[in-house]
């Protein structure tokens, strides 16, 4: 079974803002993260980005960055996000289940590119829908269910 861990949970009240780490988040079924501007009834409720990709971008572009700076909701470690096909289910923490809906997205001018000069979500980010809600915090396990 493939496993990883949650490094950080990041939210912002509105779209188009950098996200900030929060101590704990709550996934809401068919919405996303509570109090996050990207929540709603659509395919990109939650974004995930690997810490390994953040660290590589920091090295390549000489950036001082932390989780949330690339506008991802969940910063992961130890899970090859790029290898997970659409439809894969992920268990996060004790109860939450997400389903992968999309890998990457179209590139566009964003707060991330304006702030950092580079964006990772278009090439390395993963999007998911919340199938079952639950609490999530840094240190929680992420397990690939299928």
Image (cartoon, rainbow, N blue to C red):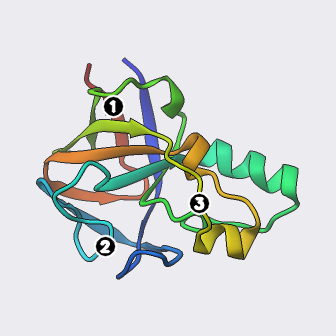
**Residue shown at the point (26%, 77%) measured from the top left:** 35
**136 or 55, nearer to the observer:** 55
Residue 79 seen in render = no
User: Relative to residue 28, is residue 82 drawn left or right?
Assistant: right
From the image, tell me which residue sits under label 1. Answer: 143
Q: Which sits earlier in the primary sequence, circle 3 or circle 2?
A: 2
Occupied quadrant, residue 110: bottom right
Q: Of the residues tagged 2 and 1, which is closer to the observer?
A: 2
Kindly state the secondary structure of the residue where label 2 is placed.
Answer: loop
Question: Circle 2 is placed at which residue position?
Answer: 36
User: Which residue is drawn at the image coordinates 31% and 38% (left, top)?
Assistant: 101
Structural crowding at the residue carrying mark 2, measured as other residues with C-alpha within 10 Å and reported as few (<14), some (14–19) or many (≥20)? many
Residue occupying the far bottom of the picture: 13
Q: Quadrant of the N terminus?
A: top left
Q: Please provide percent x and percent y for residue 70.
A: 59, 62
Residue 108, labelled with which disc?
Answer: 3
Rendering coords of residue 142 (x, y %) = 36, 38
Q: Quadrant of residue 50?
A: top right
């Amino acid at each position: 079974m493939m496993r990883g861990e949650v490094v950080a949970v990041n939210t912002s009240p509105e779209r188009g803002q950098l996200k900030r780490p929060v101590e704990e988040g709550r996934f809401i079924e068919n919405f996303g993260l509570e109090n996050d501007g990207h929540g709603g009834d659509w395919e990109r409720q939650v974004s995930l980005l690997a810490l390994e990709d953040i660290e590589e971008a920091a090295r390549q572009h000489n950036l001082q960055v932390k989780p949330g700076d690339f506008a991802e909701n969940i910063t992961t470690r130890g899970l090859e996000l790029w290898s997970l096909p659409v439809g894969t289910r992920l268990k996060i923490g004790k109860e939450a289940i997400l389903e992968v809906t999309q890998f990457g997205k179209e590139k566009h001018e964003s707060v991330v590119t304006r702030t950092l000069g580079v964006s990772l979500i278009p090439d390395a980010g993963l999007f998911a829908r919340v199938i079952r809600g639950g609490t999530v915090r840094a240190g929680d396990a992420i397990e690939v269910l299928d």
